[in-house]
Amino acid sequence: MLDIIGVAPTQLILGYATTHLLPMRHARLYWAVMLVICVGLLPIRGLIPAPLRILCSVTTFALPAFLYEGPIGRRLLATASVVVCMMAVEVASDALWMVLTGTPIGDYDAARANMPEFLFMHLMCWVALIAVFSALKALFGKLNSSGSGEGMLAYAGFPTVQSIFLMLMATIGL
């Protein structure tokens, strides 16, 4: 139940932002994959082996690079930007949880014992995600209208690789 309260709205915000950042071919396909991963696997998230969780995370974040329209550099930059923004907000949310409760974020007993803090932390996460993704959409809207940003491919690779490594470490519990 806690995963549904905390993770499902975050995934819906991520899905909405991802499908509206750049024009996307087959947005329904992306939503179908997101919903299967979120709704289908969320109730059994704790039972899923680490390699499958990693595959689901990579799929969620990498699929837009293939579905976005436009030059590859812009698609990779958009994908990397979403990953970096998502991770930054999650790190800030985890830090807020630690400040509020002094317990690790993955401790379900602590979450149940600190339900007001749990709900507050997630509410702040959602507000931050909406704000960050709105700013990102405005930035990409400006890049799209000006035609600039085509040379950004070199900059997209570094945060993408770093984010994938960070996701892998977080997923396997390092």
Image (cartoon, rainbow, N blue to C red):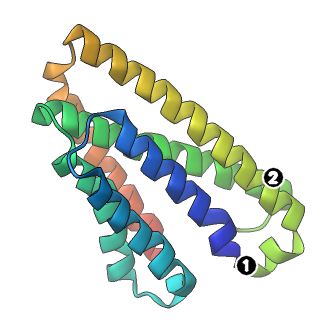
The label on residue 50 is: none
Query: Three-letter amino acid code at disc 2?
Result: Phe
The label on residue 108 is: 1
Please give the name of the residue rendered at 52% of the width and 43% of the height, measured from the top-left corner. 88
Residue 161 % position (x, y): 26, 49
The earlier-in-sequence mark between 2 and 1 is 1
Circle 2 or circle 1, nearest the eye: 2
Residue 103 % position (x, y): 77, 67
Query: Three-letter amino acid code at disc 1?
Result: Tyr
> Callout 2: helix, strand or loop?
helix
Question: Which residue position holds label 2?
Answer: 120
Label 2, label 1: how far apart the Cα atoms are? 16 Å
Please give the name of the residue rendered at 44% of the width and 28% of the height, measured from the top-left corner. 136
Is 105 positioned to the left or the right of 86 in the image?
Answer: right
Residue 35 visible in the snapshot: yes
Is 168 positioned to the left or the right of 104 in the image?
Answer: left
Please give the name of the residue rendered at 29% of the width and 43% of the height, measured from the top-left corner. 79
Outermost residue toward the left?
71
Give the crowd class for mark 1: few <14, some 14-19, many >=20 residues within 10 Å: few
| Residue in the foreground of this view, choosing between 109 and 22 | 22
Residue 143 % position (x, y): 29, 16
Is 96 positioned to the left or the right of 162 in the image?
Answer: right
Residue 146 % position (x, y): 25, 8
Please give the name of the residue rendered at 38% of the width and 44% of the height, measured from the top-left corner. 18
> Callout 1: helix, strand or loop?
helix
